[in-house]
Amino acid sequence: MTPSRPYIMRALYEWIVDNACTPYLLVDATIRGVEVPRQYVKDGQIVLNISPSAVIELNISNDLVMFNGRFGGVPTDILVPVSAVIGIYARENGQGMVFEPEDPPPEPDDDPQPPEPAPGKPEGRPSLKVVK
């Protein structure tokens, strides 16, 4: 199954905006692929205002959060892998959700071994048997 995190993020974003609050994204800026202005990162994290009035072309896809925002008056393209999102919440009341950290993808093996067949399963082409 696909991860639920981006679906939950999109739903919470909509809920926060519908309730006239300001959606903030808490991001782990140490994750590979995070592109944010590093001068605003504190303790490895950054808080991003993703309200419709603060960003242009917000896109919360299944893999990335992308938008253009202003930092110190300078327009900046922001890219955040969904796995780097720690939480999404409303600035006004703190309501939202904090996500469990995702396991990092496995490191590739230097000497990959072919997978072993499961015990009790025949190798080769699968077949069906009619049972009456």
Image (cartoon, rainbow, N blue to C red):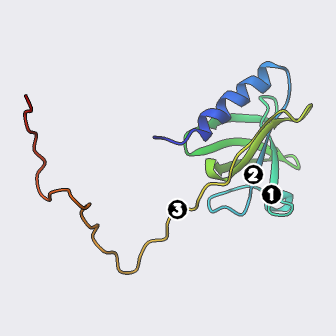
Query: Image point 64% across, 34% down: which residue?
Result: 8
Q: Which amino acid does label 2 sit on?
A: Val
Q: Residues within 10 Å of mark 1 (few under 14, many from 20)?
A: some
Q: Mark 1 points at which residue?
A: 45
Classify 114 as above or below 38: below
Q: In screen coordinates, is 61 left or right of 1?
A: right
- The quadrant of the picture occupied by the N terminus is top left
- Sequence-wise, the earlier of marks 1 and 2 is 2
Q: How crowded is mark 2: few (under 14 residues within 10 Å), some or many (20 or more)?
A: many
Residue sitting farthest toward the right: 92
Q: Which amino acid does label 3 sit on?
A: Pro
Mark 1–mark 2 distance (CA, rounded to whole Å): 6 Å
Which mark is drawn over residue 105?
3
Give the percent coordinates (x, y) of residue 55. 76, 36
Classify 113 as above or below 103: below
- Sequence-wise, the earlier of marks 1 and 3 is 1
Query: Image point 57% across, 38% down: which residue?
Result: 4
Mark 2–mark 3 distance (CA, rounded to whole Å): 18 Å
Q: Name the residue under label 2.
A: 27
Task: Kindly state the secondary structure of the residue where label 2 is placed.
Answer: strand
Q: What residue type is labelled 1?
A: Gln
Give the percent coordinates (x, y) of residue 40. 85, 57
Query: Image point 81% across, 29% down: which residue?
Result: 53
Give the percent coordinates (x, y) of residue 108. 44, 72
Classify 101 as above or below 11: below
